[in-house]
Amino acid sequence: MPDLRHTTPDPRPPRFDIAALTRLRAILGARPAIEIEAPHLKRAAVLIPIVPSDHGWSILFSLRSLNLAAHSGQISFPGGGVEAGEALEAAAIREAREEVGIATERVELIGRLDDLVTHSGFLVAPFVGVIDQRIDYVLQASEVDEVFEVPIEALLSPQQPEVRYVPFRGKHYPAYYYHYKQYEIWGLTGRILKHFLDFVWRAV
């Protein structure tokens, strides 16, 4: 596939603008998420943060610490385990605050995506949240090594995603790989991102 690590800025106006964000709110608000009942799995929640940038809107990702017992060194959305008695959406917002310093009052939740089951035994609820202003990220050093933003326009490139078929328990399944600069986003994060961008395409 084409090398997207050193792309030049697109001079055209972004397709995902304020009007598209308004349409995305309506699309997600009108669609109930598929919720999976699996009490034996560990519950987790993640936040897909849509952040304002100089040239439109971007998605925030984090690079997990190499010291973590699970999913170390992987690119992810802010998120983690749900505490006893905690609402799923509250967990997603709390984890974003703890991991990367996004204040609770800065997050506007605009929708929930379908539950996903991970190979490591988690049942994950993804939430989409708009961050209303630029912030200085404060990283939880024990869990996050780095954060970075990817313009939504880059994720809407016709070359995205790259699809590879990976083996699992004797079968092959499609895996979605998104490329931006030196980063390769795949795995569970790639699955969630693909699901989210399917709705973004409807909004632009």
Image (cartoon, helix red, strand yellow):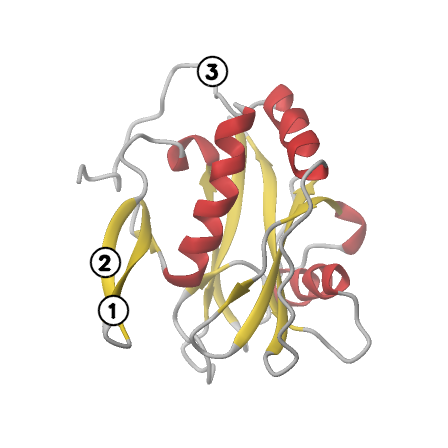
Where, by quadrant of the figure, is residue 125 drawn? bottom right
Q: Which residue is mark 3?
A: 13
Whether residue 204 is situated above or below residue 76 in the rendered picture: above
Q: Check disc 3 and report its element: helix, strand or loop.
A: loop
Going by the numbered disc 2, the residue's amino acid type is Tyr
Q: Earlier in the sequence, mark 2 or mark 1?
A: 2
Residue 65 point in image, percent of width and height: 45, 74
- Is residue 114 left or right of 129 when viewed as pictured? left
Going by the numbered disc 3, the residue's amino acid type is Pro
Q: CB atoms at circles 1 and 3 under 8 Å apart?
A: no
* Front in this rendered view, residue 87 or 185: 87
Q: Which residue is mark 1?
A: 171
Distance from disc 3 to disc 2, alpha carbons, whole Å, reads: 34 Å
State the residue at coordinates (18%, 37%).
Answer: 2
Distance from disc 1 to disc 3, alpha carbons, whole Å, reads: 43 Å
Residues packed near mark 1 inside 10 Å, few (<14), some (14 to 19) or many (20 plus): few
Q: Which residue is mark 2?
A: 165
Q: Check disc 2 and report its element: helix, strand or loop.
A: strand
